[in-house]
């Protein structure tokens, strides 16, 4: 049986500046976020995606998928 879930990958994944930045700093945490959001059930709850759709521009690279900032 396949371990893959049934969710499509977020179309923004290859250009996500948050993941590009933080993958080098904490790859384990990023992989958890990717499986939850970018390739998972919470993809349509992603605040980064919501921002991008609303404004047409990428959010700040420090904004997490839950909308909180990693920088004060
Ligand atoms: S963090 Fe959000 S916008 Fe970025 S790739 Fe993942 S689901 Fe898409």
Image (tube, rainbow, N blue to C red):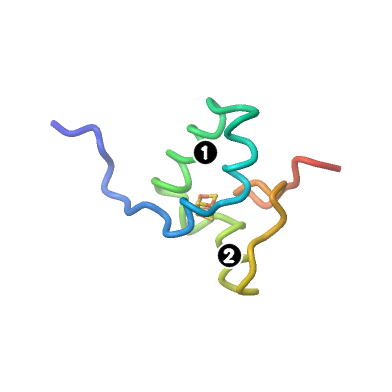
Which badge, 2 or 1, comes first in the chain's sequence? 1
Q: Is residue 39 left or right of residue 48?
A: left
> What is the distance, in whole Å, between disc 2 and disc 1 at their CAs?
16 Å
Residue 42 image offset from top left, x and y in percent: 47, 50
The residue at which mark 2 appears reads as 50
Tell me the element at label 2: helix
| Residue drawn at 42 percent across, 55 percent down | 10
Decide: is 26 above or below 46.
above
Crowding around mark 2 (Cα neighbors within 10 Å: few <14, some 14 to 19, many 20+) is: some
SS state under label 1: helix
Residue projecting furthest to the left: 1
* Residue for point 65% across, 28% down: 25
Pick the quarter of the image with the N terminus: top left
User: Ligand 1 within 8 A of label 1's CB?
Assistant: yes
Q: In the image, 69: left or right of 37?
A: right
Image coordinates of residue 16 in percent, x first then y, are 55, 52
Q: Position of residue 62 (x, y in %)?
A: 72, 46
Reading the image, the residue beneath label 1 is 33
């Amino acid at each position: 049986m396949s371990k893959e879930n049934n969710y499509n990958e977020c179309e923004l994944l290859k250009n996500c500046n948050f993941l590009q930045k933080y993958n080098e700093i904490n790859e384990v945490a990023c992989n958890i976020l990717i499986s939850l959001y970018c390739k998972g059930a919470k993809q349509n709850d992603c605040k980064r995606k919501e921002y991008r759709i609303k404004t047409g521009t990428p959010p700040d690279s420090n904004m997490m998928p839950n909308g909180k900032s990693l920088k004060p």
